[in-house]
Amino acid sequence: MDYIVSEKTGQAIQEAIDEATKAGGGRVRLEPGVFLSGTIYLKSNVELNIPAGSCIQGYDKPELYDDFTDPGFESVSPENSKKCLIACANAENVSITGRGEINGVGPAFYERNVPEGAFFAKPPYPRPRMIQFFNCRNVLFSGVSFIDSPGWTFWLISCEDVNITQVRVVGCQQMINNDGIDIDGCRRVTVSDSFFRTGDDCIILRAIRKKLDVPVVCEEIMVNNCVLDSRCQGIRIGCPSDDTIRNSTFSHITFRGEGSGIHCECPLRYLRKGCEGYLKVSDIHFSDIDITTGRYPIRICCEGGITLRELSRFSFVNMTFKAKLPLWIEGTAATVIDGVTFDNVSGTVESDVPMVTRYVRNLKLDRFNVTATRGDVVPFDRKPSSSWETAF
């Protein structure tokens, strides 16, 4: 059954969702126009349909949003915020569809009096995320444009069987921490045929430990036919205090941006308090990738002093790139990167070295053609020498 919402308020949308839920489910369909809103709670068996010409626009004040709370959700509260525009917990058969827009008016939350082109300054108060789903099953996001989230656009936590297709995630690139999709401890998530332009990372796989004694696994993530543009990273895999990320594929990806293309970096600055490293990453596969970047095309590294459980079995097949910095694969004596394959990879690097590798075991190069095109010219400077060669 359809529940048509004509009153242009988030409260009216919530009332329609609640009414559909009482009836066992249904489609909540917005009429054309702008619906100003704080937090909206989606529930099982409800489709929120936002047709072309319709827009849910978030308020520009954080106090008008609810904190995301659930008895089973122990959040580490990234960016010290629990607030979000659209929330969903412990639900199934939930969808957001249509060709309309959800707009978070993100720049309104930042201090924008900065030099031209610089990142906006983060405010002292928490900024809401746009979409936050926890422990949900059979979820669909299709067709909608997600514009200018003040914080992470999507945070999907412990969800399964999620399909994200034909969406646009666009955020002002002067905003920081406006990630595209953070897929955190989820299973069987597909992202396809979509476009991302963000100031921060576009697509991120995480396994954030909410309680240190409760395992978190992120696996069977498939991303294909997507275009990415980021000032930070197109694809990020994990942070050093995360749990387990494995068995995921990225294919037919185009990246154009100032940031790095593919990034799995574990620096000391990202360690949680009392942690010396915990992340385990394995079996992450990339194919048919085209990257043009102002930084690294691929960077997999672990900073000295951190000990991870595993960084292994990365493959890159059918890849082309143009980059300013080299391919960079660097482990440590405590965290050796094991099993990196490059097959049919070609590119140019505006640097004096095409590739940097340290503490890598089982590195395989097949049909590998990478050229370093630039470097400092050392001027000729003859110095006195006692060598007999100088007598001629």
Image (spheres, grey):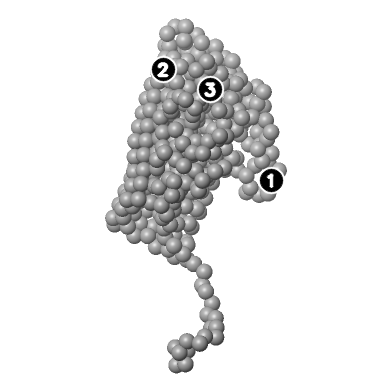
The image quadrant that residue 108 belongs to is top right
Q: Give whichever of 328, 330 is nearer the camera.
A: 330
Separation of residues labelled 2 and 1 (CA atoms): 43 Å
> Please, what is the three-letter code of the amino acid marked with disc 1?
Val
N-terminal of the pair, mark 2 or mark 1, is 2
- Residue 272, placed above or below residue 291: above
Residue at disc 2, secondary structure: strand
Q: Quadrant of the N terminus?
A: top left
Task: Report which residue position mark 1 lands on.
Answer: 114
Separation of residues labelled 1 and 3 (CA atoms): 35 Å
Task: Report which residue position mark 3 lands on.
Answer: 74
Are the residues tagged 3 and 2 within 8 Å (C-beta)?
A: no
> Please, what is the three-letter code of the amino acid marked with disc 3?
Glu
Horizontal arrangement in the rendering, residue 190 relative to residue 43 (left or right): left
Residue 308's x, y, as percent? 44, 40
Q: Give whichever of 135, 307 is nearer the camera.
A: 307
In this orientation, does residue 292 appear? Answer: no
Residue at disc 3, secondary structure: loop
Identify which residue is drawn at 43% across, 45% down: 335
Task: Report which residue position mark 2 lands on.
Answer: 92
Are the residues tagged 1 and 3 within 8 Å (C-beta)?
A: no
Pointer 3 local density, CA inside 10 Å: few below 14, some 14–19, many at least 20: few
N-terminal of the pair, mark 3 or mark 2, is 3
Q: Which mark is residue 140?
A: none
- Residue 147, placed above or below residue 9: below
| Disc number lying in front (3 or 2) | 3
Residue at disc 1, secondary structure: loop
Residue 277's x, y, as percent? 49, 38
Residue 176's x, y, as percent? 59, 40
Q: Residue furthest right?
A: 113
Horizontal arrangement in the rendering, residue 118 relative to residue 391 (left or right): right
